[in-house]
Image: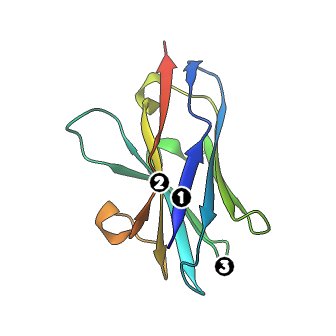
Amino acid sequence: QVELVESGGRLVQAGGSLRLSCAASGTIGSKYTMAWFRRQALGKEREFVAAIDWSTGEVRYTDSVKGRFMISANNAKNTMYLQMNSLIPDDTGVYSCAARADVIRYTDLEYYYWGQGTQVTVSS
């Protein structure tokens, strides 16, 4: 049984920073990927934000967050982080962490495990 628990979301002013955490428990596999997705509004599709291959350290970002967000992992704590800097109102949304066996993929349908989400609100 895999459990993912996010934390760190809150209200922040534009230009500010936040760090989200995703604590994982259980066994996903010997090679796996963890990712952040966000849903910016009800009815909108969940979009890929960033991902990290836990085995190789390879990372990927969606274009809109490159240079502002950084994904990282602490193997000892089984925790993934998303450092978000220079936040803008368009970053507002529910951020969810997800996990899958094997390599990085960019669509939510390809991830098997999900956290409950944490709300990030960026005010202008």
* Label 2 crowd (10 A; few <14 / some 14-19 / many >=20): many
Q: Earlier in the sequence, mark 3 or mark 2?
A: 3
Do labels 1 and 2 touch, CB within 8 Å?
yes
Give how far apart the Cα atoms at labels 3 and 1 are: 21 Å
Asked if residue 61 can be seen in this view, the reply is no
Do labels 3 and 2 touch, CB within 8 Å?
no
Do labels 3 and 1 touch, CB within 8 Å?
no
Return the residue nearer the eye: 12 or 69. 12
Asked if residue 29 can be seen in this view, the reply is yes
Q: Position of residue 66 (x, y in %)?
A: 55, 47
Q: Regarding mark 2 in the picture, which secondary structure is present there?
A: loop
- Describe the colour scheme in one phrase: rainbow
Please tell me whether residue 1 is drawn above or below residue 122 in the rendered image: below
User: What's the residue type where badge 1 is placed?
Assistant: Leu
Horizontal side, residue 84 vs residue 95: left or right: right
Q: Which residue is rendered at x = 67% and y = 72% of the image?
A: 57
User: What's the residue type where badge 3 is placed?
Assistant: Thr
User: What's the residue type where badge 2 is placed?
Assistant: Gly
Horizontal side, residue 48 vs residue 76: left or right: left
Q: Which mark is residue 4?
A: 1
Q: Which mark is residue 115?
A: 2
Give how far apart the Cα atoms at labels 3 and 2 are: 23 Å
Q: Position of residue 106 (x, y in %)?
A: 38, 64
Location of residue 29 by image quarter? bottom right
Q: Which residue is rendered at x = 54% and y = 78% of the image?
A: 28
Q: Regarding mark 3 in the picture, which secondary structure is present there?
A: loop
Location of residue 34 by image quarter? bottom right
Q: Which mark is residue 56?
A: 3
The residue sitting at the top extreme is: 124
Q: Earlier in the sequence, mark 3 or mark 1?
A: 1
Q: Which residue is rendered at x = 38% and y = 68% of the image?
A: 111
Please tell me whether residue 25 is drawn above or below residue 68 in the rendered image: below
